[in-house]
Amino acid sequence: MISLPIFENERDDLVPGSRYSGSQGGGVAVEHILEALPQPIYMTDANGRITFYNSAAAAMWGVHPEIGKSEFCGSWKLYWPDGRPLPHDECPMAVALKEKRANRGLEAVAERPDGTRVPFLAYPTPLFDNAGNLTGAVNMLVDLTDRAIADEAEQRYAAIFASSDDAILAKDLDGTIISWNGGAERLFGYTAAEAIGKQVAMLIPQERHDEEPAILGRIRRGERIDHYETIRRRKDGSLIEISLSVSPIRDREGRVIGAAKIARDITERKRAEQQQNLLIREMNHRVKNLFTVASSVVSLSARSAETTTELATVVRDRLNALARAHALTIPSFSEASGSSEYTTTLHELIRTILAPYDAVSSGHRARVTGADVLISGSVVTSFALLLHEFATNAAKYGALSVPEGVVDISCQEDGAQFVLTWTERGGPTVNEKANGDGFGTLLGEATVESQFGGQIVRRWHPEGLSIRLSVARERLSTI
């Protein structure tokens, strides 16, 4: 037990702002020492009447209790941590005096007269004389306001950590995973139990294992890594494109002890960028083709025109037809649905696309037969681009490059499949290299195979090119 001198002579002039009932003569008074401490401290007699308190205690309570009258605690009101009122005669100091034993580390809440509340820990210790008689007690209070603020912030961050759609994980400087949120579970497929304690390298494809030492090296230097795009491996072995942000984790002394990572799935963004790049390339390619088509229209028209006036008329008509074909690829806005829509029939689209190549004097050079079907949505654009590519190549190398060439387009419904067959006749001899592996082939594969889930087959016969494409019929108006 702690035994301190008993203060018999009251003095009230030693320490400004403090109140006490006595001091020890000679040397530095105990009250001076207690007053100088930054922690709230007060003392009582054996009956619980306050005999001393320092300035820190008064500041925490927001009041100056009466020496010799106020009992057990100088606060205006007291509460338990759960908000229940706490009578002064049941507070930690009162219990310590009643039970004559230290009653340390109990938490309570003091309310000031202005209504603010201060959570604190109490460390009351009874005092005894040399004969073992209880003479009073001393209590030190620990203000928990900063801890409460820190706890609230921690709970807020924990809620963000748990609810974030992004994968958030932490690792130590050896690369061992030490925390793992729900977003990480969804993104990578590992539960927290499966991931924590494992090396983060389990997420990194073999060919990218050199990335982790480089990242850890930068983290050890206190650097932050923002929006680093890379590829990681899921539990099922599939690869995923992510944007990675990494920040150092520091201890109280500011030393780097680990790293926090935020990983965001950018698969859809990358897919959109690839689609955008494809469309930009297609646009560039298409503009060039328009110039080629215009040149072909002029050249073909010049072969049959006898006067410049006739040539101008024929060229104008054919370029206008080409413009109408282009217009079919532009959506019409529907006010009812608030969206842009494409709707036409496949036969109409084919005729419009091929209209610029029909020779006025020799009838239709492009013949469409078989089943017709309504097409809508992005299918209109996709088919228009494909047919435009077929026609452009035919004008460059195939049946539409000479006046006598023709193209037969046959449309058939084959169960759940819709089949379009493009057959060229009467043109120059063609070979696979002429049409081969260029952008048109890439566009055809991307559209028919990737978008329609169908198939496109090209065959080069001596009499001309034949193209057979098949798509699921249900996709013609739902894509």
Image: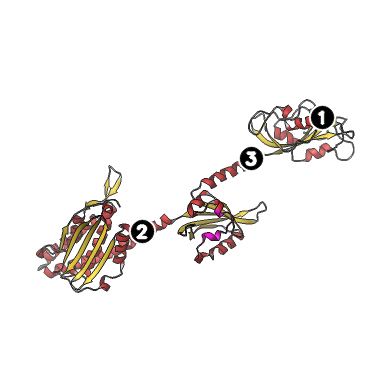
Q: Residues within 10 Å of mark 1 (few under 14, many from 20)?
A: many
Q: CA distance from mark 2 to mark 1?
A: 83 Å
Disc with the residue nearer the chain's start (2 vs 1): 1
Q: Pointer 3 and pointer 1: residues touching (CB < 8 Å)?
A: no
**How many tags in the picture?**
3
Picture coordinates of residue 425 (x, y %)?
Answer: 16, 69
Element class at badge 3: helix
Q: Nearer the viewer, residue 463 or 138?
A: 463
Q: Is residue 279 left or right of residue 211?
A: left
Element class at badge 2: helix
Q: CA distance from mark 3 to mark 2?
A: 51 Å
Q: CA distance from mark 3 to mark 1?
A: 32 Å
Mark 3 = which residue?
148
Residue 117 covered by magenta stretch = no
Residue type of the residue flagged with mark 1:
Asp
Disc with the residue nearer the chain's start (3 vs 1): 1
Picture coordinates of residue 319 (x, y %)?
Answer: 19, 61
Mark 1 = which residue?
45
Residue type of the residue flagged with mark 2:
Gln
60 up-or-down from 423: above or below? above
Instruction: Tell which residue pokes out farthest to the top in this image.
Output: 69
Q: Residues within 10 Å of mark 3 (few under 14, many from 20)?
A: some
Residue type of the residue flagged with mark 3:
Ala
Q: Is residue 290 visible?
A: no
**Residue 275 got which mark?**
2
Q: Nearer the viewer, residue 33 or 458?
A: 458
Q: Residues within 10 Å of mark 2 (few under 14, many from 20)?
A: few
Residue 198 covered by magenta stretch = yes
Q: Is residue 46 visible?
A: yes
78 up-or-down from 194: above or below? above
Which contiguous range is marked in magenta? 194-204
Q: Is residue 188 left or right of residue 296?
A: right
